[in-house]
Amino acid sequence: MPRLERSQLVPRERSEVFAFFADAANLEALTPKFLSFHITTPLPIEMRAGALIEYELRLYRIPIRWKTLIEAFEPETRFVDVQLRGPYRTWRHVHAFRDHPLGTEIIDEVDYTLPFAPFSAIALPIVKRQLRSIFDYRAKAVAERFG
């Protein structure tokens, strides 16, 4: 199963960083504009295990609806979202937050599979590159937000 792993250090308290990421309204600020991403679930969303969040985005101009379940929610430590409906066959994203002497370490682990196996093997290098680009954008947005 393909996995994307990222880690980023920000010079802020874990409680502040976690609160930002746990507020679904901030997802749009962390997503590249070319995806035309927006949340369709009415805000505010109470983040908790069992919460459902629906989004719409455009990928290569194709509209995509995405629905995620917050599978686990541990305040100030981690939360996990899994795709119930969307562009992937499977998607599980662990967002973890750890204290660091210089602030907070943000850790992302995304495990995913593509639909239409075995043909998905052809698209996998493109998808990997695109996910890296999306998470590069996110890292830049986080650095700008938290200094």
Image (cartoon, grey):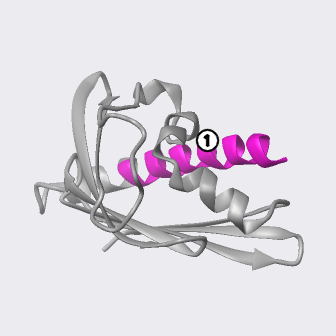
**53 above or below 95?**
above
Q: Which residues are magenta?
A: 127-147
Q: 125 or 92: which is nearer to us?
A: 92
* Most foreground residue, 88 or 48: 48
Q: Of all residues shown, which one is farthest toward the top? A: 61
- x, y percent for residue 41: 29, 37
| In the rendered image, the vertical position of residue 71 relative to residue 147, given as above or below | below
* Prevailing SS of the magenta stretch: helix
Q: Is residue 96 magenta?
A: no
For disc 1, the marked residue is 137
Is residue 100 something that shows in the picture?
Answer: yes
Quarter placement of the N terminus: bottom left
Residue at position x 52%, y 48% in the image: 23
User: Seen from this angle, which residue lies furthest right?
Assistant: 102
Residue 47 on image: x %, y %: 42, 57
Judged from the image, the secondary structure of the residue bearing numbered disc 1 is helix
State the residue in front, 43 or 53: 43
Type of amino acid under label 1: Tyr
Name the quadrant containing residue 65.
Answer: top left
Residue 93 seen in the current view: no
Quadrant in which residue 121 is drawn? bottom left
As drawn, 38 above or below 70: above
Q: Residue at x 81, y 60 (%)?
A: 12
**Magenta segment includes 136:** yes
Residue 45 at x, y = what percent? 39, 46
How many labels sit on residues? 1
Give residue 44's position: percent from left, percent from top.
42, 40
Q: Quadrant of residue 17?
A: bottom right
Q: Residue at x 32, y 27 (%)?
A: 60
